[in-house]
Amino acid sequence: MEWQSGQRNECTYNFIVDNIHKVTTLPITYFAAMLLVRTGFRTDDPGMITGENTRRGLVALATLVPGIFQFLSAIPLFFCDLGGEKRKRILQELAERRSGITTKKSEKEIPTIVPADFNLYM
């Protein structure tokens, strides 16, 4: 984003990601609870011995379902063109732009709050 616009927007990005997380947490929790019910897992009877189908369902919920979603979330990475020469060019342009900004800031005179005739050891 900084490479295209020249401005850094981490705050905006974090705000958007945080709100997306808040909005999607409720449906995901509901979905997980429904899958637990479908496996036959019960929390109302802690002494109940779980059956083989329940154990398989819990293993699937803990391994297969997250694995499938991890794979699906990695698919956009295959279409992202940020490797090789393009990445080097982006990093070089950002370094040049940032060095130009820092030299402009260092050329400015920093105003002092304390007057020049102020005596610290009165």
Image: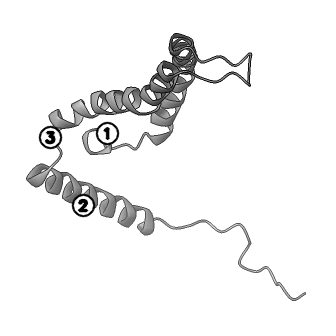
Residue 96's mark? 2
Residue depth check, mark 3 versus mark 2: number of the one nearer the observer: 3
Q: Position of residue 86 (x, y in %)?
A: 12, 49
Residue 22 is left or right of residue 81, and the answer is right
Which residue position holds label 3?
81
Residue type pointed to by label 3: Asp
Residue type pointed to by label 2: Glu
- Can you name the residue that lies furthest to the right here? 122
Q: Residue at x 17, y 36 (%)?
A: 78
Residue 19 is left or right of residue 96, and the answer is right
Quadrant for residue 49, please give it: top right
Q: Residue at x 70, y 19 (%)?
A: 43
Which of the marked residues, 3 or 2, is nearer the chain's N terminus? 3
Q: Residue at x 65, y 69 (%)?
A: 112
Choose between 114 and 72: the one closer to the eye.
72
Residue depth check, mark 1 versus mark 2: number of the one nearer the observer: 1
Say few, some or many: other residues with alpha carbon within 10 Å of mark 1 (under 14 / 14 to 19 / 20 or more).
Answer: few
- CA gap between label 1 and label 3 equals 14 Å
Secondary element type, mark 1: loop
Quarter occupied by the C terminus: bottom right
Which of the marked residues, 1 or 3, is nearer the chain's N terminus? 1
- Can you name the residue that lies furthest to the left here? 85
Q: Position of residue 41 (x, y in %)?
A: 59, 18
Q: Position of residue 87 (x, y in %)?
A: 17, 52
Choose between 8 and 121: the one closer to the eye.
8
- CA gap between label 3 and label 2 equals 22 Å
Which residue position holds label 1?
1
Residue type pointed to by label 1: Met
Secondary element type, mark 2: helix
